[in-house]
């Protein structure tokens, strides 16, 4: 029982803090749709398909990307939010995207998660590929209406809470005392 108490206490003492949102301000992002750069066009190129049009700078309150068929739109915010819009009925097939920020981010990407799924049915698959790139699959997602949307958040690496030395000592002393009192009760019985 003492070991269980110690394990529980250690888990509480060393619990992880939530990952803080990361800023996308001043970053440049390159996108692909089903593995092809030609599948997305960026704001810097006025959404015209041309060489390099799948790379654009993040501009707060503007759409950064449209898919070449204009079905999806992507809006990255300086605060680390990504809102994905469906402008039309989704065609059948795979809908997989990658977004790579290269070395333009101020902090490494540690998490990428849905924060507002109210505009969709189904679960998008969001994956952190590395410290500067993510992928998302919308293959099993349907939008609840034309121009429906959902929002995801980029976060930094989760910080591990480090307990103070006094906290550990108090935890161990309490667990030892609790274990000794249980042992004395067991001997009396």
Image: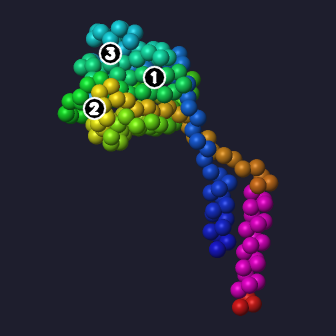
185 falls in the magenta region: yes
Left or right side of 132 for 156: right
Q: Quadrant of residue 4?
A: bottom right
Closer-to-camera residue (47/62): 62
Mark closer to the observer (3, 1): 1
181 falls in the magenta region: yes
**Mark 3: secondary structure:** strand
Q: Main secondary structure of the magenta part?
A: helix
Residue 79, how many percent across, how many down?
Answer: 54, 25
In what quadrant of the picture does the N terminus appear? Answer: bottom right
**Mark 2: secondary structure:** loop
Residue 163, how many percent across, how many down?
Answer: 72, 50
Image height check: is 154 above or below 18?
A: above
Per the model, the C-alpha gap separating discs 3 and 1 is 14 Å
Instruction: Please give the label number shown on residue 76.
Output: 1
- Residue occupied by mark 2: 95
Left or right side of 88 for 183: right
Q: Residue at x 26, y 25 (%)?
A: 88
Image height check: is 187 above or below 165?
A: below
Q: Quadrant of residue 66?
A: top left
Q: Residue at x 53, y 21 (%)?
A: 78
Looking at the image, is mark 1 or mark 2 earlier in the sequence? Answer: 1
Q: Residue furthest left?
A: 92
Instruction: Please give the label number shown on residue 185.
Output: none
- Residue occupied by mark 3: 41
Point out the stretch of residues depicted in magenta. 168-186
């Amino acid at each position: 029982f003492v070991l269980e108490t110690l394990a529980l206490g250690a888990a509480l003492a060393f619990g992880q803090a939530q990952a803080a949102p990361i800023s996308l301000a001043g970053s440049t992002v390159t996108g692909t749709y089903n593995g092809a750069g030609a599948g997305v066009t960026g704001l810097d190129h006025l959404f015209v398909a041309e060489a390099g049009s799948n790379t654009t700078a993040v501009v707060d309150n503007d759409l950064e990307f449209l898919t070449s068929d204009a079905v999806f739109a992507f809006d990255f915010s300086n605060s680390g939010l990504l809102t994905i819009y469906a402008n039309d009925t989704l065609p059948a097939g795979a809908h997989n995207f990658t977004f790579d920020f290269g070395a333009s981010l101020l902090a490494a990407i540690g998490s990428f998660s849905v924060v507002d799924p109210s505009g969709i049915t189904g679960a998008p698959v969001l994956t952190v590929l590395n410290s500067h790139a993510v992928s998302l699959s919308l293959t099993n997602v349907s939008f609840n209406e034309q121009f429906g949307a959902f929002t995801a958040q980029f976060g930094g690496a989760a910080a591990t809470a480090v307990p103070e030395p006094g906290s550990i000592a108090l935890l161990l002393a309490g667990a030892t005392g609790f274990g000794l009192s249980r042992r004395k009760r067991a001997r009396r019985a």
